[in-house]
Each structure stands twice: as structure tokens, then as C-alpha cells.
Image (spheres, rainbow, N blue to C red):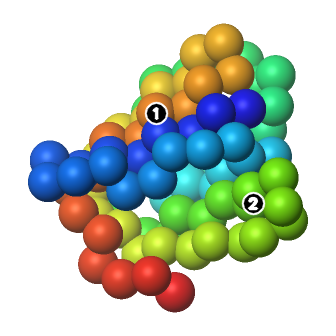
Amino acid sequence: MQLEIISPEKMIFTGSVSSVTLPGASGSFQILENHASIISSLVKGRLSFVTHQNELIELLVEDGFVEKNNNKVTVCLESIIKEL
């Protein structure tokens, strides 16, 4: 599935991934390929994803939201605090 992570300042990541784990307002949750469509708010916490090259990337992020539709995940963030 395609993942796009953006902030008001820049494009943070765009590429193909096998999974995304997000800090949701009701707790952490994971999105996999062919997951049902979803829109959710995000809170400060750990966002991680696994690329198709099996690279795990982790970020500590501020508030935002995520939309998943047709195997495209779009994450809009206030900012990234740091890469972990």
C-alpha cells in the first residue's frame, strides 16, 4: 500500500509500505494492506511503518489525522518531534 506522511512544512515520506502503526486518540492501531477505509485523529506518540524492503522506520509525532482509502494511507501531522 502507498503511504504519504505530510506536515505543514514539507513532505516527510512517500512510498510503498507493508504496515503502518499509529498513535490514535483511543490507543495505538495498525493498518495493513486491504484494510477497511478509516479516518482517525492522532495524538502525540510513536508512528512506525515497515517498508517493502523490511526497513522499520519510527517517528515521535505531534497531533494529526490519518485517512486510509483504496490502499493509500495519508497521514497529516502537526510536526515530527524526532526520528527514533
The reply to whether residue 24 is in sight is no
Of the pair 76 and 65, the residue shown nearer to us? 76
Q: The residue under label 2 is which amino acid type?
A: Val
Q: Where is residue 29 in the image (x, y as percent from the top left)?
A: 65, 50
48 over 35 or under it: above or below: below
Q: Residue at x 14, y 54 (%)?
A: 9
How many numbered marks does the figure carry? 2
Query: Position of 10 compared to 44: left or right?
Result: left
Quarter holding the N terminus is: top right
Mark 2, residue position: 50
Mark 1, residue position: 74
The reply to whether residue 1 is in sight is yes
Q: Position of residue 65 (x, y in %)?
A: 36, 39
58 over 39 or under it: above or below: below
Q: Residue at x 14, y 47 (%)?
A: 8
Mark 2 or 1 closer to N-term? 2
30 over 34 or under it: above or below: below
Query: Position of 32 compared to 83: left or right?
Result: right
Q: The residue under label 1 is which amino acid type?
A: Thr
State the separation of the CA atoms marked 2 and 1. 15 Å
Query: Position of 7 compared to 22: left or right?
Result: left
Q: Where is residue 48 in the image (x, y as percent from the top left)?
A: 61, 65
Q: Where is residue 13 in the image (x, y as percent from the top left)?
A: 46, 53
SS of the residue at dot 2? strand
SS of the residue at dot 1? strand
Query: Position of 57 compared to 63: left or right?
Result: right
